[in-house]
Image (cartoon, grey):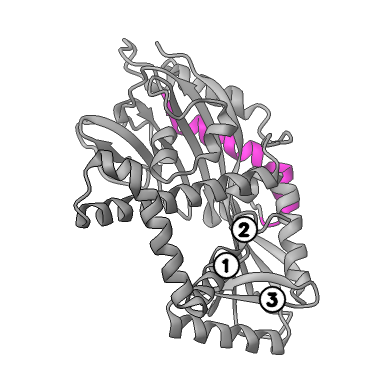
Amino acid sequence: MSEFKLIHSGFDKLDVAAQGALPQETIDMLKAAKERAQKHDEPQLVTIGPGNVEAHVFDRGMRGGYALRLNTGPLGANFFIKECPLPSEWNFFVASQSTGLLAYGFRDYWRRLVETLEAMGAIVGRESLNRVDFAMDFVTKNFELSHELFVAPPKCRVKQHFGEWEGAAKDDLTPTIVGSGRRLQSVTIGMMPGRQVIVYDKRTEAIHKRNLHWFEKWGIDPKDKSIQVWRVELRAGKKHLKQDYGLTTMQDLEDSICDLFKRMAQDIRYIAARQTDTNVTRAELHALWRAVNNGLADALAEHESGLLPGRILEIERDKQKAIYMQNILGNAAGMAALDGMTAERAADQLPGVVSARLKRQIDRDQKSFADKLQKNSERLRFSTNRG
């Protein structure tokens, strides 16, 4: 049986609605930026309020009346804002970013987001929790996920075991399965805005999305294919938070979220294979789920990432540079092919040829290049910001 070592735990999502409003003149400025974003088909960089908050304004908002969408970078959040200047209304919806939570932890992160709104000139009132996710990453080897080993006893039922059994019916705890070839990569149980548990191959996802900061956080080599990292993510939506547990504020979150997630891991669990007892309520837990329960024991302890915010931004910059270098290499190879170069000749001459042609092109139209540089500087503002 595989062993599972916890290498990261912490809040991965924190979505919150808030009461309050921006001044009318700020709303008008953001509406104009939204129109420019629609015209140019790309986000527009703006500076907002007395705190000179930099943000990208997008061409559309979100349903529910949130006409404006702002993003303040990988350590910030997505702010969805209604075009209403009345502070008594619920005009803000703040959607977190996992990099910000990783860098600061949920307490400090939320404080920073409130300070960001206030720096924009906003009056900020009460908050209302919308969604909270808690994630745990486990390093292991030779683990194969099986949807048939998940157990979830819904209310008012004796039991339900996921798999093929007589009388089985789809409900809000029926698993959703994602695989690649014959290998199962993800199982999701539950539906939002209720409760949801997902187990998935985080190493594969991090490579696919080029989120390389995770490998530094985990302390593992992304090239070592023998090492697996599986994530268990416990998700509590608005309905589960408020109707089932009465959690609304950040203080409620600190007081009771540990109990919520512990109960979730008891109701929805992963059991060991090949058991003789047909009563799943007595089934032995899989080693993965024993590790989950141990990890939740200190669920609300300080979750320091071990990565400074500046280091996260540095990793993001390196990722973007690698993407651009791959594009440059591909285009240069195409140019070499058109010039009839062999691989040996290209290795020797192509860098100089490309450099000379690039310099001539820049010299030929310096204004056009300066405009492109400025445009990209605005688009990549939060990746180039070193402060």
Q: Residue at x 46, y 65 (%)?
A: 359
Q: CA distance from mark 2 to mark 3?
A: 16 Å
State the image coordinates of residue 243 (x, y, percent, origin top left).
57, 54
Name the one closer to the observer, 199 or 56.
Answer: 56
Above or below — where is 324 with respect to 139?
below
Q: Residue at x 79, y 72 (%)?
A: 51
Above or below — where is 120 with respect to 306?
below
Q: Secondary structure at mark 2?
A: helix
- Write the start and end of the magenta stretch as one range: 248-270
* Amino acid type, mark 3: Thr
Q: Residue at x 20, y 57 (%)?
A: 338
Which SS type dominates the magenta stretch? helix
Q: Is residue 238 magenta?
A: no
Q: Secondary structure at mark 3?
A: strand
Q: CA distance from mark 2 to mark 1?
A: 8 Å
State the image coordinates of residue 378 (x, y, percent, origin top left).
57, 70
Above or below — where is 154 with respect to 360?
above
Tell which circle, 2 or 3, labels the residue nearer the N-terminal end.
3
* Amino acid type, mark 2: Thr
Q: Could you tell whether 98 is left or right of 157 in the image? A: right
- CB under 8 Å between callouts 2 and 1? yes
Mark seen at residue 384 = 2
Q: Secondary structure at mark 1?
A: helix
Name the one closer to the observer, 344 or 76.
Answer: 344
Which residue is label 3 attached to?
Answer: 47
Which circle, 1 or 3, is nearer the viewer?
A: 1
Tell which circle, 2 or 1, labels the residue nearer the N-terminal end.
1
Above or below — where is 275 with respect to 208?
above
Mark seen at residue 377 = 1
